[in-house]
Amino acid sequence: MSLTLKKISQFLRHNSLKLRNVRHYCKKAEDTEIPVNPLKKYYSANDQATNGHIYDKKPFKYTCVAGKTYAWCLCGRSSSQPFCDGTHKNQFLQIKHKPIRFTVTETKDYWLCNCKQTKNRPFCDGTHLREDIQAKRTL
């Protein structure tokens, strides 16, 4: 019995540390630099007025390679989140959101938005910390 309680407490401690690190990164601070998508002016998908379905209430950390082009899922229905797998092309789902193409200038870890509500697509800007987004239920 004590062994399972010990494992549960270790699990809870480990997960709370992970969430604390995510929230720390995503708070708006003066010293935190939010990256910008250099391809924003070349693709019209960046001008979509509405946001997609909330996939998750926390960002996704991914190591992006400089110069490589990625397709970030805006519709929130992709099975390979946070990247697009073409689910938006299914005519029966009637999804109007198209993926956001982006690249980065240096190879390092980036936080990609999973709530799909960010103003700086595809990078997390801390929007997922809003109470209305945290209250919504994800599928």
Image (spheres, rainbow, N blue to C red):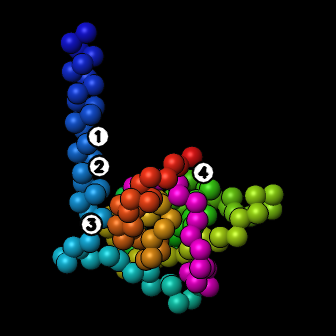
Secondary structure beneath disc 2? helix
Q: 103 or 121, which is in the foreground?
A: 121
Q: Position of residue 109 (x, y in %)?
A: 33, 64
Find the magenta span and give its range.
Answer: 44-58
Residue 19 circle label: 2
Q: Which residue is mark 1?
A: 15
Q: Residues within 10 Å of mark 1 (few under 14, many from 20)?
A: few
Q: Which residue is mark 4?
A: 79
Residue 27 circle label: 3
- Of all residues shown, which one is farthest toward the left? 31
- The alpha-carbon separation of the residues under discs 2 and 1 comes to 6 Å
Q: Residues within 10 Å of mark 2 (few under 14, many from 20)?
A: few
Q: Position of residue 117 (x, y in %)?
A: 48, 68
Q: Amino acid at mark 4?
A: Ser
Point 65% across, 70% down: residue: 97
Q: Residues within 10 Å of mark 3 (few under 14, many from 20)?
A: some
Instruction: Give the dominant element type of the magenta stretch: helix, strand or loop.
Output: loop
Mark found first going from the N terminus, 1 or 3 = 1
Whether label 2 touches label 1, CB < 8 Å = yes
- The alpha-carbon separation of the residues under discs 4 and 1 comes to 23 Å
Mark found first going from the N terminus, 4 or 2 = 2
Let me know if residue 48 is in the magenta part. Answer: yes
Mark found first going from the N terminus, 4 or 1 = 1
Quadrant in the picture for residue 66: bottom left
